Image: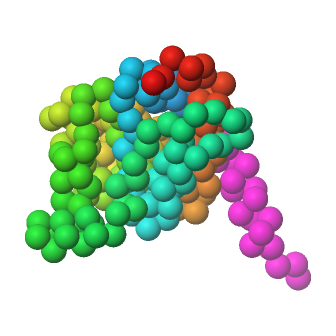
């Protein structure tokens, strides 16, 4: 009797999900161009998520402020789940569902971009941040999974990974944000002050 390797099963599942994601290419590129245009026109990127999605949000922001592969100027990005004092203050005073929307209200402006990560699409605090962003004229990008959840159809750009497995969704989110960064590395940032 042969026991199936969990590793081989995960690799095969990831390959299947990546193949299914080929249909998302235009959406991924459109979102990347929206980020590029925002920054070129004086905007900044705001990111947020919970748990593993918080790590994805932080990953995207730090690669913009620091650098990805190419040497380029620092680009404006703020991860809303990185400021523990803001999160605990807002959570204590307004509730956990407001930890991102309150920051969007204070930090966001028209021409900015909000990227929210949620594997289920049902994170109430990310959804509240998207709602606040829309009220302020901020472009919204949703990276999700499964069937899209409550966030499906609520954002300017949505990229829903066709998988029900949280780990595979997060792995593809990392792949997508790396694709964005590769595109941004090729942009001409010399026009920025």
Q: Which residues are magenta?
A: 1-27
Question: Split into 4 quadrants, where in the image is the N terminus?
Answer: bottom right
Q: Is residue 58 magenta?
A: no
Q: Farthest residue in the left direction?
A: 93
Q: Is residue 99 left or right of residue 169?
A: left
Nearer-the-camera pick, 163 or 114: 114
Residue 128, above or below 181: below
Residue 131 at x, y = what percent? 20, 42
Residue 159 at x, y = what percent? 47, 38
Rendered image quadrant of residue 25: top right
Q: Is residue 170 visible?
A: yes
Magenta span: predominant SS is: helix
Nearer-the-camera pick, 186 or 51: 186
Residue 123 at x, y = what percent? 31, 58
Q: Farthest residue in the front direction?
A: 193
- In percent of the image, x 50 and y 37: which residue is there? 75
- In percent of the image, x 33 and y 32: which residue is there? 112
The number of numbered badges drawn on the structure is: 0
Residue 143, above or below 180: below
Q: Is residue 69 left or right of residue 58?
A: right
Nearer-the-camera pick, 34 or 67: 67
Question: Split into 4 quadrants, where in the image is the C terminus?
Answer: top left
Residue 190 at x, y = what percent? 56, 20
Residue 134, above or below 2: above
């Amino acid at each position: 009797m042969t026991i199936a390797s969990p590793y081989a099963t995960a690799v095969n599942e990831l390959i299947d999900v990546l193949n299914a994601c080929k249909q998302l290419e235009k959406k991924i590129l459109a979102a990347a161009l929206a980020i590029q245009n925002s920054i070129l026109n004086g905007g900044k990127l705001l990111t947020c998520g919970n748990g593993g999605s918080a790590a994805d949000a932080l990953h995207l922001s730090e690669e913009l402020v620091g650098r990805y592969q190419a040497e380029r100027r620092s680009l404006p990005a703020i991860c809303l789940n990185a400021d523990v004092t803001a999160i605990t203050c807002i959570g204590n005073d307004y509730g956990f569902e407001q930890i991102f929307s309150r920051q969007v209200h204070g930090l966001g402006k028209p021409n900015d971009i909000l990227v929210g990560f949620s594997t289920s699409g049902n994170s109430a605090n990310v959804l509240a941040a998207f709602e606040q962003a829309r009220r302020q004229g901020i472009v919204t990008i949703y990276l999700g999974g499964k069937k899209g959840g409550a966030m499906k159809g609520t954002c300017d750009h949505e990229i829903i990974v066709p998988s029900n497995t949280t780990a595979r969704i997060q792995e593809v989110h990392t792949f997508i944000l790396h694709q964005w960064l590769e595109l941004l590395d090729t942009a001409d940032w010399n026009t920025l002050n």
